[in-house]
Structure formats: structure tokens, C-alpha cells
Amino acid sequence: MSKLRVGILGATGTVGQRFVQMLERHPLFTVSALAASDRSQGKPYADACAWKLAGEMPRAVRELTVQPPRPPLDCDVVFSSLPADVGREAEGCFAAEGYPVISNTSSYRMDAGVPLLVPEVNPEHLALLDGRDGAFIVTNPNCSAVMIALALAPLHRRFGVAAVAATTLQALSGAGYPGVSALDITDNVLPFIANEEEKIERETQKILGTLRDGAVEPAPFPVSAQCHRVNVQDGHMAAVRVKLARKAALAEVREALTSFRGAPQELGLHSAPERPIVVRDEPDRPQPRLDRDAGNGMSVTVGRLLPDSVLDYRFVTLSHNTIRGAAGAAILNAELLVARGYLKA
């Protein structure tokens, strides 16, 4: 098939730049349009964007003129990394005009008719799109919810999950650029990220929920989250404690995690890691510097897997928040949409 032309909303921001980087030489997609805020509009992308990622800005996008984030846009599909306060209106306008929208924004995640998708975990939720004729919104989760849901999915399938408590340690890049003031984060940990705990709790339940009669029934177990900002550039961590619905030996739990595969692996999708969950047995792993790039940033790493004296088991999970937790998650969603026939050139 010919490549799908992609328009990126919020193209100059942290996640927008990651979209641009990851879509360079992609076999299914080519970037044809870039959109951003008023101060960037009308400029070539090279002038409008202060490139912050390792390596050079891709040559193919440097001369693209930055446009307003509203229709029409010269593309077949829209990828959005807009801030939530403007994302809902903009994404809704594109969907209303017949564009498929693949969103990293939180605006539509909890809407009843919108799939909140982790392709390895809940691809069946794409049935919510049936009959939409190519105009729809699909979202990926919060950057911490995606790694927590991925780690819980094989346990929920194999043993059932009865309760979850998670404490996150979230990287600076999750706050965007310029992000958190150096005077606030140096020699410090911030024990509050606005709306983050509610997102993790609700989104995890939706992702692991059951599609029934055209709607998603949230997973019935409670999720408790506490969130912290730490002085790490990339890589979110979560210390997770889980109560299982039925008893399981440590070896069974480990095997459930290591053997877990999903639709992206079965279909051989371009961005899919060979192992969505990498289990480390060293007592001091995972660590952001050492493990955030596992599977080209698309694998979730689980370590410190041990019995817990309060619930049943505890572990630490880590993922790259701007790749698996943001742009990479949306791109993998789009690849699955192509494979399942929801996106066509």
C-alpha cells in the first residue's frame, strides 16, 4: 500500500518532536503536515521548533510550514500531542471533518465511544469504531498508566487482579519543555502531579475492562496511585503492589510476565517490541538510565518481583515515557489500525 500522510498537531513540543523522529522512514506513514500554536504558525518547522532530541531534525520536515491545529490539513490521518486544554476542541473538529485522529492527549480518553488502547492488552476495544467510516478518535493512555496496565495485563488474564497500589517516580520530560523549574526539582522530589493519580486509576480500569454490548465495563478491582516528579530526564517508574484473585506461585507470576505477547507481536507490527515485558532478576533493576530504551523504548521492564507481606506480590516497572508512554504508543496504535483495516491510504 502507499504510505498514509500524517499531520502532527503540537509538532513543536516534546512529544510532537518524538512523533517526527519516530516517523522518519516509517514503512506505513510519512509526515506531510505540521501544526502548532500561534507563535509557530507560518514559519518553516526548522525555525519554529527548538529541537531537543538526540540527533538532527529529519531533513524531510525542516521546510514544512507550521499550520494552525484545525482543519483542513493536508493529510490522511492526524496524530495529536496537543495540551489537554486545547486538544478536545481541535481533535473533535478534525474527527467531525472526517479525519481519523490518533491522540496522545488526555481529552477523550475516558469518553465512552473512544478506545483507550494498548495494542497488546485490549485490541478488542477497537470494535467501538465499527461503523464510523474512517472518522474517529483513538487515544493512548497516560504515560504511567500504560506501563502499569501492561504489567498487570498478564496477571489479570492468568490469575485475576483483586487490588492494585502503585507509587510512581516520573521523569522531568513528562512535564514537557521547559517543564519543572530547576529550583524546584534540584535536590528535591515533588510529591504531586496535577490530575495524574486520577488518570492512572481510571485509565487502568478502562484499559483492563471488558467490552460488552458496545461499551467498556471498567475492570472491577480498585487501583490506588500516588505520583511523584523526580530528577530524571526520561523514564517513568512505578512501585506496584498487587493482590491476585487466586493464589499463584512466584514462578507462575514471573512466567506469566515473561511469556506475555499480544496482537502487535503476532502481526509483526513495525514498532512492536519482540518482548513487550522484559523481566530483570538483578536486585537493583530496573533503572531509568539502563532500561528505558529496552525494545527501542517500546518495552516495559519489570524487576524486584517478590512476594508482598500486605498484598500478594510487589514489583517495580519502568518505561520510556515519551516513547512507549506517548508518541510510540500512538504510532503502534496507528499500525494496529492499519492492520485491522480501520486506516487506509
Image: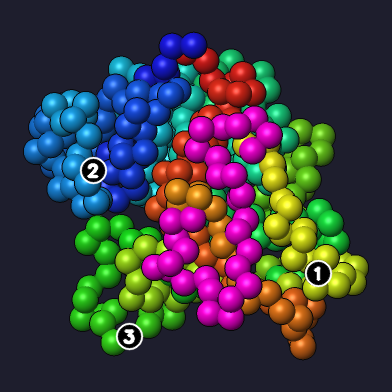
Question: What is the total number of numbered labels drawn onto the structure image?
Answer: 3
Q: Is residue 103 magenta?
A: no
Q: Which residue is mark 2?
A: 12
The 10 Å Cα crowd at callout 1, few under 14, some 14 to 19, many 20 or more, is few
The structure residue drawn at horizontal position 42% and vertical position 17%, both measured from the top left corner, is 3
What kind of residue is marked 1? Ala
First in residue order: circle 3 vs circle 1: 3
- Whole-number angstrom distance, CA of label 1 to CA of label 2: 46 Å
First in residue order: circle 1 vs circle 2: 2
Q: Which residue is mark 1?
A: 251
The 10 Å Cα crowd at callout 3, few under 14, some 14 to 19, many 20 or more, is few
Work out which residue is located at the far front of the displayed protein and give it: 282
Q: Which residues are magenta?
A: 265-294
What kind of residue is marked 3? Asn
Q: Which residue is mark 3?
A: 188
Magenta segment, prevailing SS (helix, strand or loop)? loop
Q: Closer to the camera, 239 or 291?
A: 291
First in residue order: circle 3 vs circle 2: 2
Asked which secondary structure carries label 3, the reply is loop
The correct choice, above or below, for 306 with respect to 296 in the image is below
The structure residue drawn at horizontal position 76% and vertical position 86%, both measured from the top left corner, is 310
Q: Quadrant of residue 228?
A: bottom left
The structure residue drawn at horizontal position 31% and vertical position 39%, both measured from the top left corner, is 21
The structure residue drawn at horizontal position 19% and vertical position 42%, both measured from the top left corner, is 56
Tell me the mark number nearer the camera, choosing from 1 and 2.
Answer: 1
The correct choice, above or below, for 174 with respect to 296 in the image is below
Q: Whole-percent x and y of residue 256?
A: 77, 58
Image check: 29 left or right of 204?
left
Q: Closer to the camera, 246 or 37?
A: 246
Q: Whole-percent x and y of residue 151?
A: 66, 60
Asked which secondary structure carries label 1, the reply is helix
